[in-house]
Image: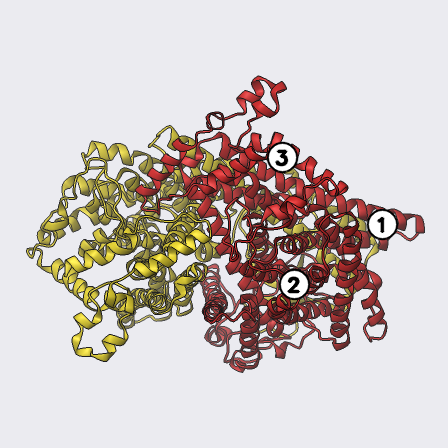
Chain colours: A red, B yellow
Amino acid sequence: MFLPAAAVVFYATATLASSEMASVQDATLEQVDEKTDNYKEIEHVDDSLDLLIYLILLTIAILTTWVFKKKRLAYIHESGVSVILGLIIGAILRYTGPAHRSLMADGTIYDPNSTGIISWNVVPTGPKANPGIPPNMLKMNISNLTYTYTYSSPESNMKPEDLTDIQEKATFDPEIFFYLILPPIIFNAGYSMRKKHFFHNIGSILTFALLGTVISTFVIALIMWGVTQTMKIKMTFLETLHFGCIISATDPVTTLAIFTDLNVDPTLNGLVLGESLLNDAVALVLVGSLEDYGKLFNTSESDATQVAAIFKAILHFFSIFFGSVGLGALLGVITAILTKYTHIREFPILETSLFFVLSYSSYLLAEVAQMSGIVSVLFCGICQAHYTFSNLSQESKVRTRQLFELLNFLMENFIFSYIGVSMFTFSRHRFEFLFIVGALFAIGVARALNIYPLSLLLNIGRKNKIPCNFQHMMWFSGLRGALSFALAIKNTVTEPRQIFLTTTSLIAIFTVIFCGGLTSPLLKFLKIPIGVIQEDSNGDTLPDRDGYEEPESESQRTPTQVRRSVLARSWKSVDSAVLKPLLTHSRPTLMDTMQWMGPVARWLTTEEQMTGDSSLREYEQFARAERKGLPTTTTTNNTTDDENTLSHGD
Amino acid sequence: MFLPAAAVVFYATATLASSEMASVQDATLEQVDEKTDNYKEIEHVDDSLDLLIYLILLTIAILTTWVFKKKRLAYIHESGVSVILGLIIGAILRYTGPAHRSLMADGTIYDPNSTGIISWNVVPTGPKANPGIPPNMLKMNISNLTYTYTYSSPESNMKPEDLTDIQEKATFDPEIFFYLILPPIIFNAGYSMRKKHFFHNIGSILTFALLGTVISTFVIALIMWGVTQTMKIKMTFLETLHFGCIISATDPVTTLAIFTDLNVDPTLNGLVLGESLLNDAVALVLVGSLEDYGKLFNTSESDATQVAAIFKAILHFFSIFFGSVGLGALLGVITAILTKYTHIREFPILETSLFFVLSYSSYLLAEVAQMSGIVSVLFCGICQAHYTFSNLSQESKVRTRQLFELLNFLMENFIFSYIGVSMFTFSRHRFEFLFIVGALFAIGVARALNIYPLSLLLNIGRKNKIPCNFQHMMWFSGLRGALSFALAIKNTVTEPRQIFLTTTSLIAIFTVIFCGGLTSPLLKFLKIPIGVIQEDSNGDTLPDRDGYEEPESESQRTPTQVRRSVLARSWKSVDSAVLKPLLTHSRPTLMDTMQWMGPVARWLTTEEQMTGDSSLREYEQFARAERKGLPTTTTTNNTTDDENTLSHGD
């Protein structure tokens, strides 16, 4: 199934191996046919068992999380639970089950009584293209039949005797993370983001994400380069820079969950989440730029070309980043237009499917264009929440939100369990105590040099300053998680890369359990306001506990903050004059805001928009919902809130 | 990513291939490291493009379906749309893009200006385990580094020049169908089934499914065996029997959709859907038994052992079938117990996740136990609908239904597009005109010999007879689809298997477009009642157009139908005396039905069940829904309907 690279190995049953070893010398096609069936069946059972282990792990994690939530234990979050359970299961898999021990080398069967891999040593014959570089495919002729073999990996540096089937199997292809696990998590982060406080603080967030991540990367790289000079394994600065990128991506998952549970002060929430989302994107693109730079650097020797390479890398970074943002936004806009100008909302299942398929396309399209799918899917999520959401039928609104919430929950718990399990089962770990301690120190220092100086700088321009307690909290919120891990596990061929993986895994485990657990006590200690009313991304009001209005919403709009205001204000004017009227059913319409466009503006305005009458639409939805036995809604705040705020605002 | 077997091949860029061919003779680990990055990146882009093609296809299919639905064109269903679009895209991929043509043989680069596979011929060296049988893994040493290669496939019998990258890539690993595509479709069929008419007609459904599928298999096998005698490629009876199994699984998808759209007579609906669901299961298990029988048959020669082998196969069939049913039901029961006796419903996201994870586990558990995951997941779906559903919070009820509806829609459309695309892109098709025509004739005859004689037989015992027009309609509803295709594509090593795949694909395409398109005209022609009120699987009443009550609900309970009544009645008494009180919050409680159990019965009864007071629970749900900005429900029919019908019934 979907565990290629290291894990797709075909198992032969012991019976098969022993009974037929002597008798069958020349296999006919029919026998190969039957054997293919057998191999596939055994492999299938193995893969199923492997997946089942993770599902059982998820089940236990869900039940444990429930118990913790019920007992109101805020000290441990579900990602912490998943990591700990993963570690336990990983350890069990690792230290039990010698009966499965069966990996063989040199064509001999290690344990003839177990199922296992049969491997042959081969040498090339005939003409070879590119000698010295392993080809993609081998062809071998046995008994007049040709069999093809595909490239798997350079041989692991672990002794084969140390590996069991189940351990090897419990390791997924890293591509899984990039195709199946990360996109829903990142999309959901964009789709469910409280966009108001994101856009209000966009200047500060971009500063922290762009400048801050670069600072963090270089500081970590420098410190770690220093550390590696005292180690046996030497690394180049380019390698430690790579590590700096990988580990600079902070994880929004755990912090987001705790902040949301506690309704923490919305400005702090906006800053921390905006930063951690965007710095994932920045770190990801930085890694790509760095790899490209590395290639240029390696092939060219002169100083001039090296400077050119640096500039090329910077240019590459910006083109990738903004290109991906553009692609994501484009897909969001296409969805908004399709949902606005067609009546596909009469069939919510089609509408939801379209929404889902187009959102995932934003990821794939960016990857095909060699840009960053993660950045693209994040901004697609933001666009979908900002424009498309208000065009959707009531049923699709609920369905899309719940779908992505569920996917996010499952994927998130899976990845944290996996980080735990793979600590024990992944065969290419390399523990370097000094490197790990150094890295923990480095990320602390790097984050401090990111948050405090930049806050100082930003506070010059900000009317509502970022207070010291917020800065401390932001420093502490630098948890590492899914993205760092996925970047680290992508390539583990060389020793430095293996050290990176081990260190990243341990840092993720440590920060998620330790920092995640101490988040709420620290919030109390720093006297940061919690239980604050917030407007949800889609205009719904979340319940507040004290009925206390957020203090900064007005002050943020005062003209004192020149730079940010220009950015935020110009965005707002384009948004409300062009984009919202064009892409949603909200008012004012294009006929009001862009009168000079005349008939074109008329053509782009829906009847619904003109009459401002959404009652027909709601009636339809009501009727359909009732027909299907779905809960019929008495509230219409989802649909109308956005429109109201806009017509008031303008 | 997840296209191993034939498709996971590593691509090297032309630049890489040409520039480094001469210079690099001895690769260092760092270079291999970089090259691994490169390979993976290129492969990643290719996989993304491949997936993107299918997503674009889905997008077009969704929009086309919408246009057809809007124009009320009942002659073509969405699966037909998907198949036709798939054929078009497949043809485009096949007959355009010679620039991609790049597959190589004999270690030479076919087109040095394109990206492509580099392959070397190899011969084994050193000791070989099992000579004559291809091993799972090859190890090759180049420049002091060892690389591993995993078994991919026996070489395709198509000329390599005929294949392009994109074509090879557009072909997924068949395992994908069994892990990702089929389980949600089959689960949803069970979960959304109108269970009343399923259980009322359980006797007839089981007869058609068990006996009918066996009849169909043998009739098809006989006819096709006759046909192959006139062909150049001879087949054994065992092989045509295999084809009979594959093609006997009728597809519920298209018929279900049309029947539901038109609210067709519920008895006909129950019979057709129940049969097509269960015969999938039966066909699947039959294939497994047959393979086992084949092995026994091949290895033993004496007549006595052959008779024993047949009995073993029959025993195997029944143990697999009922074992799988049991496993599926077990997981359903576990979910019901967990949702009844814990208060996990206070956190709907945890509840839904648990539901999802446990349901999918039923599939994997059965596969690990070497039973049938599809059968297991189907019965798990039925149990979840029958018991667990009524324990769920309102939010989870909506969420689970919508989630599986969406998954089902996407997977279904994907599989039909894929059948279309793979007609052109899959490299192992083999067209045999005579076989295809023969098979079309055979499935018609076989279905007639299944439906008409068994109806005659069943009508002896049935009070409400199956009328002739229903029988004609049942005969016509024998569409072939997802499951047959998945079974056929699983193994395409030998020529007969390749012929099976081609024939199965064509029959699926033909029946889905032709029979699917003629379903509603035929319903009118046969004067079968449509627009009939139905009770939904979960107790909700669907809207009717004429307000006309279903006529058979009472008559079916009359004691005249002895055999069926005994089966249905004994099931009903166990269900309402033990299972419902134990597994749901419905009344009467165990304390009423099983008084002799005393304190145990008391312990197994929830407070909610005793007081019959679900108002507290609903208040909680209301509060939570409001807090999250979800539609708050004013109807409670989902929660109470089941309980009401039961307390009335007993």
Residue B256: image location, x then y, percent: 31, 44
Classify mark 3: helix, strand or loop. Answer: helix
Q: Which mark is residue A485?
A: 2
Whichever of labels 1 and 3 marks the residue nearer the N terminus, that label is 1
In front of the other: B557 or B587: B587
Q: Which residue is mark 3?
A: A575
Asked if the residue at tag 3 contacts the one at tag 1, i.e. Cβ–Cβ closer than 8 Å, the answer is: no
What amino acid is labelled 1 in the image?
Ile
Q: Are marks 1 and 2 in contact (CB under 8 Å)?
A: no
How dense is the environment of label 3, judged by Cα within 10 Å: few (below 14), some, or many (20 and up)?
some
Secondary structure of the residue carrying tag 1 is: helix
Q: Is residue A527 left or right of residue A562?
A: left
Give how far across and how far down residue B458 sits, in percent. Answer: 13, 52
As displayed, is residue A616 above or below residue B301?
A: above
On the picture, is B332 further left or further right than B265? right
Q: Amino acid at mark 3?
A: Asp
> Is A54 situated above or below B555?
below
Q: Is residue A189 visible?
A: yes
| First in sequence: mark 3 vs mark 2 | 2
**Dot 3 and dot 2 residues touching (CB under 8 Å):** no
Label 2 lies in what chain? Answer: A
**Three-letter code, disc 2:** Phe
Whether labels 1 and 2 belong to a single chain: the reply is yes
Q: Is residue A422 left or right of residue B207?
A: right
Taking depth in this image into account, of A73 and B563 the one nearest to the observer is A73
* Label 1 crowd (10 A; few <14 / some 14-19 / many >=20): some
